[in-house]
Amino acid sequence: MSCPDHLSLSRRALVAGAAATAAATNSGTAEAQPTATTIPGQTTMANVSFRVNGEPRSLALDTRTTLLDALREHLQLTGSKKGCDHGQCGACTVMVDGRRIYSCLTLAVMHEGDEVTTIEGLGQPGNLHPMQAAFVKHDGYQCGYCTPGQICASIATLQEIKAGVPSHVTADLTAAPQITAEEIRERMSGNICRCGAYSNIAEAAAAVTRQPGAKFIAGGTNLLDLMKLQI
């Protein structure tokens, strides 16, 4: 069946018309966007105060500064590593008020008054934290880039289990989770080791709990007290 002459339209004309319409729409949208949110060079500063490794610290920061960049670039605490910068690798893991977080995914200004603990706050070369010593003993690293985040995550993992927080592999949600290889691997799955030292990392974390008399100290806001192991 043929179309009337006034309704006939070639494929070329149809495509050309659609392209012209799209171009006009995009142009109008770009012009309609407010300029107040896109002023080049505009910076909003804010003051933030928190405790880092037990010491009070105050900074004046661009409000877009992540906690990771505040630690590395402003406080020179470079133990926490920038890997993916998208919350996908765990190299930047630190502990805030006893809970592990990806410091690349949170803004520093969100942590006013918080207690932040990084790898630098756990131990010293002559006095290692038990988890650090376990990583050394069980070769829980190869290149070492992810190790600070792995150690912080391991400490927080054991604290989560001790506090009764279940995971995806906890079989009985009405009972306290147990420290098992499966639990440790599941809870540590957000920390990537591209060298593949996973089995040694899990063994290091488990070994800490097997040390004679090992127990967690509960209470307090200072993570060095909250998470420290008594041997």
Image (cartoon, grey):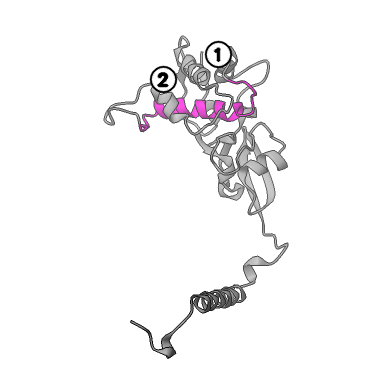
Q: Amino acid at mark 2?
A: Ala
Query: Magenta part of the protein: which range?
Result: 141-168
Under circle 1, the secondary element is: loop
Q: Earlier in the sequence, mark 1 or mark 2?
A: 1
Under circle 2, the secondary element is: helix
Residue at the image position 63 percent from the left and 46 percent from the top: 49
Where, by quadrant of the figure, is residue 41 drawn?
Answer: bottom right
Q: Residues within 10 Å of mark 1 (few under 14, many from 20)?
A: some
Q: Amino acid at mark 1?
A: His
Give coordinates of residue 54: x percent, y percent. Answer: 62, 33
Residue at the image position 49 percent from the left and 31 percent from the top: 220
Q: Which mark is residue 181?
A: 2
Give coordinates of residue 84: x percent, y percent. Answer: 60, 40
Q: Which mark is residue 138?
A: 1
Mark 1–mark 2 Cα distance, whole angstroms, equals 15 Å
Question: Quick one: 88 or 111, which is closer to the camera?
Answer: 88
Give coordinates of residue 217: x percent, y percent. Answer: 47, 23
